[in-house]
């Protein structure tokens, strides 16, 4: 039963983010040689960006407000494709339905923030973030 409930909650979250993404501008990935961030970052908060590096290491960047920024650090930067997942709360709300625990006493609410989800990737070559079409073999 717990597995089924988890699946229903996940499906509801995906449906909510798809609705939100269709009527609002989607964040646009930007980068320079050592950082990745997003533009059109309006209406989003409490963002978690989880980055999977080519060597399997995971990094997490959290931003309570504003865009999360991932920066390459260290002397040994791994070349390859870095994948990320973004999760955030939008400024839109929806009614709580069913028996969800939505707080107690004065913290109780009948609405929750609509979630946002997005994933993507970027490429690192020779220790810097590059645009894939800029790569040329010599």
Image (spheres, rainbow, N blue to C red):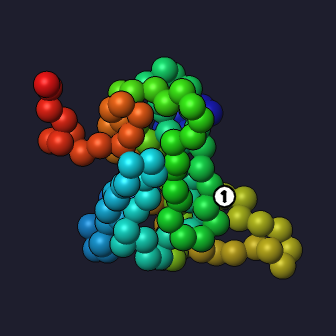
- Picture coordinates of residue 137 (x, y %)? 14, 26
Q: Is residue 66 visible?
A: yes
The residue wearing badge 1 is 100
Q: Is residue 46 shown above or below 91?
A: above
- Picture coordinates of residue 23 (x, y %)? 28, 74
Residue at 41% x, 34% y: name it: 127
Q: Is residue 33 shown above or below 83?
A: below
Residue at 14% x, 32% y: name it: 136
Q: Is residue 136 shown above or below 108?
A: above
Quadrant position of the N terminus in the picture: top right
Quadrant of res 82: top left
Q: Nearer the viewer, residue 66 or 116?
A: 66
User: Residue lying farthest front?
Assistant: 138
Residue at 66% x, 58% y: name it: 100
Q: Nearer the viewer, residue 86 or 31?
A: 31
Specify few, some or many for label 1: CA neighbours under 10 Å numbering under 14, 14-19, or 20 or more.
few
Q: Is residue 81 visible?
A: no
- Picture coordinates of residue 60 (x, y %)? 60, 43
Label 1 residue SS: loop
């Amino acid at each position: 039963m717990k597995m089924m409930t988890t699946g229903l909650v996940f499906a509801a979250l995906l449906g909510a983010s798809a609705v939100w993404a269709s009527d609002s501008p989607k964040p646009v990935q930007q980068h320079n040689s050592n950082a990745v961030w997003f533009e059109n970052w309006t209406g989003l908060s409490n963002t978690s960006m989880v980055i999977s590096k080519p060597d399997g290491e995971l990094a997490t960047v959290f931003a309570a407000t504003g865009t999360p920024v991932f920066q390459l650090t260290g002397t040994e930067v791994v070349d390859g494709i870095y994948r990320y997942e973004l999760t955030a709360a939008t400024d839109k709300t929806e009614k709580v339905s069913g028996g969800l625990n939505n707080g107690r006493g004065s913290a109780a609410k009948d609405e929750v923030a609509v979630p946002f989800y997005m994933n993507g990737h970027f490429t690192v070559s020779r220790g810097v973030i590059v645009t894939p079409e800029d790569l040329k073999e010599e």
